[in-house]
Image (cartoon, rainbow, N blue to C red):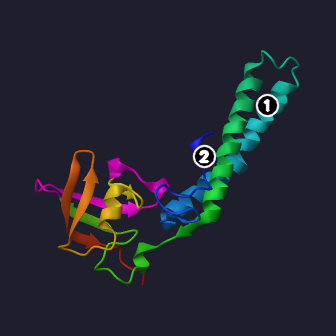
């Protein structure tokens, strides 16, 4: 069973039935991917499979074999996207009223014990990209930061042990006028 089939359990470490929080941008990107797969890529692959099937012997027909495999991949991804979008809850950080605390969508700079500072933005699970400083709201760092204010110290469990980190800045995008 793939990760994509195991969606009924919800995010790891949180109760089943918890929504999948997403930024408006993440939600739009997921909808665009679903549309592209269903309305553009799948029809093209279906056409190729139909053409390849019309040639006769399917057992050694590479176009047919590859096309059928690609259709299964597309259909699996479409199921995943539909389920995810159905259970998603869009949270727009621009609408956050308590801007002095860390919540979903916040960009937070925190200081480690060695005085290095790290800046992260707390986003949905499917939007996380550590290389871009975008961490999932269920990640250990995000969970340690959620609800904290500038100057708060919190403990972060790392592979090397417990580390104390301090919230340095909290930033939310501006509301649209």
159 relative to 97, above or below: above
Residues tagged 2 and 1 counted as in contact (Cβ below 8 A)? no
Query: Which label number is shown at residue 169?
Result: none
Residue at 21%, 63% (x, y): give it.
110
Residue closer to the observer: 97 or 154: 154
Magenta stretch contains residue 117: yes
User: For mark 2, does the 10 Å Cα neighbourhood hold few (<14), some (14 to 19), or many (20 or more) residues?
Assistant: some
Split into 4 quadrants, where in the image is the N terminus? top right
User: For mark 1, does the 10 Å Cα neighbourhood hold few (<14), some (14 to 19), or many (20 or more) residues?
Assistant: some
Query: Which label number is shown at residue 4?
Result: 2
Disc 2 to disc 1, how far (Cα)?
Answer: 24 Å
Residue extent of the magenta highlight: 112-132
Split into 4 quadrants, where in the image is the C terminus? bottom left
Give percent across and percent down for residue 89. Answer: 55, 69
Please count the marks in the image. 2
Q: Is 1 placed left or right of 172 in the picture?
A: right
141 relative to 3, above or below: below
Mark 2 or mark 1, whichever is nearer to me: 2
């Amino acid at each position: 069973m793939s990760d994509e089939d195991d969606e009924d359990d919800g995010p790891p470490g949180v109760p089943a039935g918890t929504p999948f929080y997403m930024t408006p941008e993440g939600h739009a990107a997921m909808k665009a991917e679903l549309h592209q797969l269903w309305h553009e890529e799948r029809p093209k692959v279906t056409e190729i499979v139909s053409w390849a099937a019309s040639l006769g012997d399917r057992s050694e027909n590479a176009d047919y074999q590859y096309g059928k495999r690609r259709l299964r991949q597309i259909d699996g991804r479409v199921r995943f996207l539909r389920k995810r979008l159905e259970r998603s809850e869009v949270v727009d950080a621009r609408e956050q009223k308590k801007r002095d605390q860390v919540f979903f969508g916040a960009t937070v700079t925190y200081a480690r014990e060695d005085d290095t500072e790290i800046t992260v933005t707390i986003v949905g699970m499917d939007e996380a990209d550590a290389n871009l400083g975008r961490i999932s709201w269920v990640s250990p760092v995000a969970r340690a930061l959620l609800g904290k204010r500038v100057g708060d110290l919190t403990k972060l469990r790392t592979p090397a042990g417990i580390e104390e980190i301090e919230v340095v800045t909290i930033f939310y995008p501006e509301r649209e006028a």
